[in-house]
Image: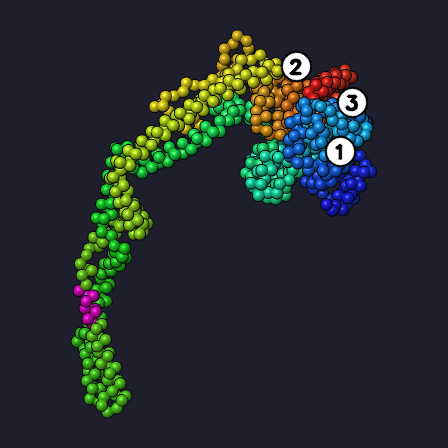
Amino acid sequence: MSRSKRQSKILEIISSKEIETQDELVSELSKCGFNVTQATISRDIKELGLIKATSDQGVSRYVTVKSVDYIISSKLITLFREAVVSFTTARNLVIVKTLSGCSTNVGMVIEQFKYPEMIGCVSGYDTILMVGMTDAGAGTLRKRLNLKLFWVEMLRNLFIKNIALISSQNIEFENGLCVLSGETGAGKSIIVDALSFVLGERADKNLIKYGEETAFVEAAFELEPDSRALEVLDEMGFERDTALILSRSLNRNGKSESRINGRLCAAGMLKGLTALLVDIFGQSEHLGLLKPENHLKIIDGYAPAENIREKLTSACAEYKAVEKELEKFGGSDEQRERILDILSFQINEIESAGLDEEEETRLLEKKKKLLNFEKISSAVGGALVALDGENGVLERIAEAVQCFAGISSLGEDFAAVSDRLDALRYEAEDIVSTIEDMSSDDEFDETLDSIEERLDRIKSLKKKYGATFADIFTFLKNAKEQYDTLSDSARITEKLNARKSALKTEIYSLSDGLSKHRREAAERFAEEVVGQLRELGMKTTFAAQFEKAPSEEEFSPNANGFDRMEFMLSANAGEPLKPMSKVASGGEMSRFMLALKNITAAIEKIPTMVFDEIDTGISGNVAQMVAKKLAQASKKEQCIVITHLPQIAAMSDAGYLIEKRELNGRTVTEVTRLDTDAKVGEISRLIGGAEIGAYGGLHAREMIDWAENFKKGLL
């Protein structure tokens, strides 16, 4: 693939300088006259095959690898992941333990990775030795293996512009446990709000930074070759790409614009895609767990009964269709008779009216004539006198005819005038006849009241049955058909009621099967929850309590079955089980949520989990247990955690400090990646504040050492 001038410049920059972040790369490119966005940089890094390598001094920098590292087939990746048990480093060696007899095949896969830091590898029965060029090279190889095993799919980058107090901020996330900390009010929730926004949540123009017209957020994800998200991209008509870049903007008018890899998309499409990539748990999810109506959904998510649910949904759909069909026949016999009476009245009312489509026009003309009767009578009488009265027009025309009759034979011009006078006389006589008919017109025999009454009846029928005569006649036709159907409905309704009864029995049986499945799943779920909570310092009794199942007669068919269930909790020994929503404290709910996510994460297979202040209401030894649990979870999924606890901050694989400061008379929020010394300082602050002194630093380093030792035991 040919490289652009910008990409060539990137390779030149990283070969001459230690570039650790995308921000640094953007800055260097800017100095060289290249204006680029985070999306562009992310694509360039992917296309050039850049990764981060760590030197002997612990300094990270972007380096190049061969592109084959990114195009290993999904089948080989699957084989690699299923067969590898663990791996460790010793000087310049990476020791890979595999399932018995699998090392040869795994070794062949590793050879295909063609890592530049690797001299070669040797396979035994269940062990592979990867030989690195240097000790640091072995460390890089270990990170690469970790990436292949667990971390291909994750949130790589989040760029935020003009959101709340953030003017422009780029955050590069790492594998494992990413922890964001800072003073209360520094703006930690802004990061979650920005991420929620780009993931497709409802847009609120109050997110836009004061004084700005547009807000923008961009998120870059790395997907696995067999990711479910790629299937969704296919279904949406987008090109498959393991480098996924999502962006969304919002202006002051409330208009938002969403894009997937640069192409416009609907916010709903964006949300449907990102539901497979990120799961955010915050205060609203805490509250959601307190609602009993959500508890059954958790059990259904834990152990889906897809076969039963499909049959149940299909049977309920047919049941509703039968009910709708019965409604056409009036439901019960009493309802049917009432409908027949109504239809009979409607049919009789329309037919007895004897409607004619031209009648209304005629009636309106008659009404107009009656309203002008005197004017018409005067005009007709006057015209008759003028035409047929004494010395009227007819007499004068007759005289003229006689005058020309005697000379018509003396010339063609006389004959022509004579013919015209004859024609004029006949036309005048016809006009007089027509006017005489008008004077005796029986239209004037009808009274204005009778015409008004008829027009009112037509108007009433239109109001009831249709705006036009055609609509009324259509209504009449349909009413007659429905009347005929209902009149002969006994046989049909008997058949439909029999089917309805059979379907209700089938639905009840399926619901009973679903209930048994749920109850068994709930027992397993409760056992797992108790185990997780014990690891989090809660010696708790927990159960999913189901209400008594209704009888078939009491049961109302529902695609969700008939179960009603609520989580019950006893947080203290000797105390009875009570509804979790009534007895769980904030700290207990935080731990329950973490336990729940640890259980369901493997089922949901969502690669990135975000915990917004999971540490609510906990401290001390419990905080240490929560930190351990987060570290364990982060070995399977990327975990992004906002916290106030030093124990969790110490456990981080990547730490970020969120600070609020004043810049040019404006308050801004900034996010800084913590190096080792800064991490110690932040943990010291979390332990006892900024003025804690040297002992705080010692304590912080001890906490970091404890966390690192714990994480080593997880490999």
Label 2, label 3: how many angstroms apart (C-alpha)?
Answer: 35 Å
Corner quadrant of residue 659: top right
Q: How is the image coloured?
A: rainbow
Quadrant location, the C terminus: top right
Type of amino acid at the residue the image marks with label 2: Gly
Residue situated in front as seen by the camera: 589 or 307: 307
The residue positioned farthest toward the bottom in the image shown: 410
Q: Residue at x 65, y 21 (%)?
A: 632
Whether residue 418 is in magenta: the answer is: no
- The magenta span reads 432-440
Disc on the earlier residue, 1 or 2:
1
Quadrant location, the N terminus: top right
Residue 168 position (above or below residue 702): below
Magenta stretch: dominant SS? helix
Type of amino acid at the residue the image marks with label 1: Tyr
Q: Which residue is mark 3?
A: 90
Q: Which residue is mark 1?
A: 115
